[in-house]
Amino acid sequence: MERSLKNVLVISFGFLLLFTAYGSLQNLQSSLHSEGGLGVATLSSLYGAVLLSSMFLPPIFIKRFGCKWTIIGAMGCYVAFSLGNFKSSWYTLVPTSVLLGLGAAPLWSAQCTYLTILGNSQARKVGELGKNVVNKYFGVFFFIFQSSGVWGNLISSLVFHQTPNKEFFSEDQLMSCGAKDCLMSTVAANYTTQPSQKLVYTLLSIYTGSGVLAILLIAIFLEPIEDNLPNREGEEKSPPFRSTLLSTFMLLRDKRLHLLNLLPLYNGLQQGFMSGEYTRSYATCALGIHFVGYVMICFSAASSLCSLLYGKISQYTGRAVLYVLGAVIHVSCMVTLLLWQPHPAQMAVFFILPGLWGVSDAVWQTQNCVLYGVLFEKDKEAAFANYRLWEALGFVIAFGCSTFLCVSTKLYILAGVLTLAMAAYGTVEYMESRSLTQLSAAGGRSQADEGETQTQM
């Protein structure tokens, strides 16, 4: 096995172990810690810290410590959050969620930077296009990483399945589910049996152990990597601290980034909707909380498989085709969610919709990272920091509006943001194609002038 692919697999399985714990734990916050709104406050604090972290920390940490040790340190913040859940209080959950949020942006920026450098380096060795190798590596990563949702939700479902669930919903109660849910229904709160403290501790112990294994895997087997693009003589290798600190904001001077930032914003919004609104207003409201894990398994499995598929076929289809495919499927799902009245008799629909949602989710996860890595290759750290900042803003908006808007309103907002994001993305693709055409024309003119000079001589 080539060394670069080995490193891709190591970082992929490290994130798989880490997010097997965190992804499922995030979905359970509002259920496990519902008293006084502690669970919602925890998530709000977490993504607020991600916003702050994305503005400043990723370029500094990656330049100072390198991608590998930035990933290891950030993973420690995730393990601390798992430990904070053992004693659910404002003094343990909120501080550890803030710590996790501060580590999240450096973690993901370092991961994207690492795979981009690794892919471009391998492409130069084998004589391939850099974007094709990078696309393949991101496809492999997200195929393995997205399956963490399958294992995490499966573990929580198997552990909590030992709690008796006797939930019976009347037709009147079911009428308030779905797009009509304006958070006036108390079905889930009144009819769901909470798991025992022993089962909660069992689940948290599994998740904490998984996070520790992830850190050990990265520390032992992942090779450090540096951006080995050739430097001109006398070029400064390490930029000043102030320049590094402000690089995230300085990159905003690029018009392309202004337009592209709508993509990660939508990505955060759509993930927040699936993990928050769909699980509560559709699955829990009509089936019961013990079905949430199984429903989210369909979402994660579809996203995982399609991530690998998109990484392989993107070099033949181009990224624009995949973006259009993702947008069409998501719009179709939104229309269905607006019109559908959830009922236990339609069991298959509860699993088909998150599966289709995952098919589109794989587009945003893989292609967004590749797009930022290709267009901003010289400023990868700052570009990915901007990406995580806007994605975190999407999460903050999704969770912040969770208790104020009806589900139907949230679906209309999602559709509107998706439309704007696709229009902005199309503009960037047009700008890039024009730029390439002008460069080709300029190159042709230079060759023609050179030929004419040689003829005269």
Image: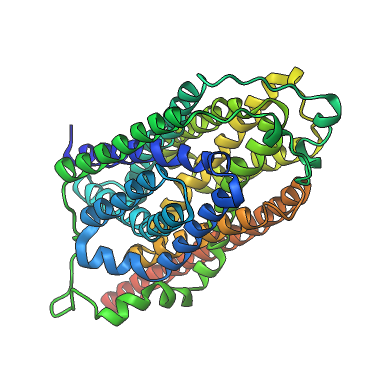
130 sits to left or right of 236: right
Total tally of numbered discs in the picture = 0
21 sits to left or right of 335: left
Residue 225 visible in image? yes
Residue 120 x, y percent position in the rendering: 27, 52
Location of the N terminus by quadrant is top left
Q: Nearer the viewer, residue 165 or 369?
A: 165
Location of the C terminus by quadrant is bottom left
Residue at 55% x, 35% y is 358
Residue at 45% x, 36% y is 307
* Rendering quarter of residue 233: bottom left
Q: Nearer the viewer, residue 363 or 193?
A: 193
215 sits to left or right of 23: left
Q: How is the image coloured?
A: rainbow
State whether residue 258 is above or below residue 90: below
State whether residue 182 is above or below residue 109: above
State whether residue 259 is above or below residue 156: below
Residue 421 x, y percent position in the rendering: 62, 57
Residue 133 x, y percent position in the rendering: 32, 44
Residue at 55% x, 51% y is 38
Residue 272 x, y percent position in the rendering: 58, 48
Query: Farthest residue in the right direction?
Result: 172
Residue 263 visible in image? no
* Rendering quarter of residue 380: bottom left
Residue at 56% x, 66% y is 259
